């Protein structure tokens, strides 16, 4: 049970870190476009 709790906590921290890194990269790159959707200046366009 203790190992499971540690695993869940580690997984949550990893997901949080990955989400933060993704948000930072999206804010530092001014324009991203993939698959018909573009992200420019903090807004999505389809």
Image: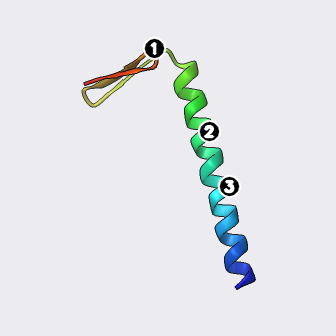
Q: Residues within 10 Å of mark 3 (few under 14, many from 20)?
A: few
- Quadrant location of residue 35? top left
Task: Report, in whole angstroms, how far the alpha carbon at label 1 lies from the one at label 3.
Answer: 28 Å
Residue 29, image x, y percentages: 52, 19
User: N-terminal of the two: label 2 or label 3?
Assistant: 3
Of all residues, the one furthest to the bottom in this rendering is 1
Residue to which mark 1 is pinned: 41
In terms of secondary structure, where does tag 1 sit? loop
Q: Is residue 24 left or right of residue 2?
A: left
Residue, x 67% and y 78% (percent of image)? 4
User: N-terminal of the two: label 2 or label 1?
Assistant: 2
Residue to which mark 2 is pinned: 20
Residue 28, image x, y percentages: 58, 19
Give above or below for 38 relative to 6: above
Residue, x 65% and y 46% (percent of image)? 17
In terms of secondary structure, where does tag 3 sit? helix
User: Which dot marks residue 13?
Assistant: 3
- Quadrant location of residue 14? bottom right
User: Which dot marks residue 22?
Assistant: none
Q: How is the model colour-coded? A: rainbow
Task: Report, in whole angstroms, how far the alpha carbon at label 2 lies from the one at label 1.
Answer: 18 Å
């Amino acid at each position: 049970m203790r190992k499971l709790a540690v695993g869940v906590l580690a997984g949550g921290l990893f997901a949080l870190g990955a989400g933060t890194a993704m948000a930072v990269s999206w804010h530092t790159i001014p324009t991203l476009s993939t698959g018909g959707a573009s992200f420019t200046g903090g807004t999505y366009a389809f």
